[in-house]
Amino acid sequence: MAAAGPSVFLLMVNGQVESAQFPEYDDLYCKYCFVYGQDWAPTAGLEEGISQITSKSQDVRQALVWNFPIDVTFKSTNPYGWPQIVLSVYGPDVFGNDVVRGYGAVHLPFSPGRHKRTIPMFVPESTSKLQKFTSWFMGRRPEYTDPKVVAQGEGREVTRVRSQGFVTLLFNVVTKDMRKLGYDTGPSDTQGVSRPSPPPGLPL
Amino acid sequence: MAEVHVIGQIMGATGFSESSLFCKWGIHTGAAWKLLSGIREGQTQVDTPQVGDMAYWSHPIDLHFATKGLQGWPRLHLQVWSQDSFGRCQLAGYGFCHVPSSPGTHQLDCPTWRPLGSWREQLARAFVGGGPQLLHGDAIYSGADRYRLHTAAGGTVHLELGLLLRHFERYGVEC
């Protein structure tokens, strides 16, 4: 009985939300979630999480460290809709309200190996100065009702944002059966630098 | 049929003299290519950087092509515009780059240019804004009729594009 080839491939990603750089803000926490296409389904691990609140270190680095673990496995039949991780960072304003300090998103890397990504974080901005003052005063800043909007390309042309920080993420990626299905994901190396891969069929 | 997935982001732009920037992008392919899923063009949000001078868009690109031939490899064309506080938009640069042809993740820096007009138009642009624009967008990514243009350099658009190829070895294509 001939074994049928696999029709589904797996993507296993683990890693962490390592740290953030926000020069103007302190006492931040972050939430992450994943956005993926219709052909994708999570099979294991956590799809979302909320980190601890971190303060800037007193030394010259001014580092905001979360060291927050990410561990998720997806299965899919089609690379279209490749999962993206969406991060939202929140912190207190001068009146003590919890306001959003940044949204950001990045695709999970698809070549196996270790990857480091530093993503910019932005907040939506009101257009009029009066609205900016009112939202600062009342503690109700403009924010997205669903952070997953950040992972989509449509509908962005009407939004104004301000980028004000960065978050560093580390990923280790393992895939299963992508090559059997005919996909070539390129060289897997830890530096993320493109190198030519050896031609197939090279005699050992 | 071989398949190509382009998965990545338009990260942002540096080197432009204006600060509130957005980018209109599109992908142009030859006749042998067919877009199976994804949106072929779009427009990013307007970003005003608070830290540093790079405008960040992080605009996701996820495209799935099927192709019967290598001709007409996809080209990404970009128009960077700036928006002032009154909502008026002014052209900051045009640019294009080919989607990479080897699988894996690539960091791309796409330089941009903008058409210069006569000295009158340049003076008007400095004071009032506006300035000449291309009538037909295909001059951005094609070489025909470029000899008529006199342009100045704009800033650089930074992209991170990942490429996933399927069944290319079946057809003997090396990349």
Image (cartoon, rainbow, N blue to C red):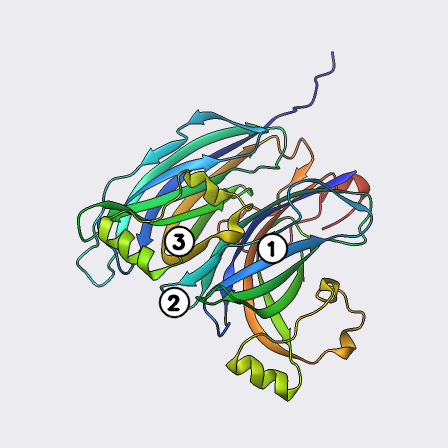
On the image, numbered disc 1 is attached to which residue?
A195
Circle 1/circle 3 CB separation < 8 Å: no
On the image, numbered disc 2 is attached to which residue?
B52
On the image, numbered disc 3 is attached to which residue?
A122
What is the residue that sits farthest to the top in this orientation?
A1
Q: Quadrant of residue B114?
A: bottom right
Query: Which marked residue is nearer to the observer: mark 1 or mark 2?
Result: 2
Q: In which quarter of the image is the C terminus of chain A?
A: top right
- The type of residue carrying mark 1 is Arg
Measured as percent of width and height from the top left, residue B82 is found at 52, 67
Q: Using the image, name the chain to which the residue with label 3 belongs.
A: A
Task: Tell which circle, 1 or 3, labels the residue nearer the N-terminal end.
Answer: 3
What is the residue that sits farthest to the front in this orientation?
A130
Assign a secondary structure to mark 2. loop
Q: Using the image, name the chain to which the residue with label 2 belongs.
A: B
Residues flagged by tags 3 and 2 on a common chain: no
Circle 1/circle 2 CB separation < 8 Å: no
Marks 1 and 2 sit apart, C-alpha to C-alpha, by 31 Å
Residue at 41% from the left image edge and 36% from the top image edge: A33
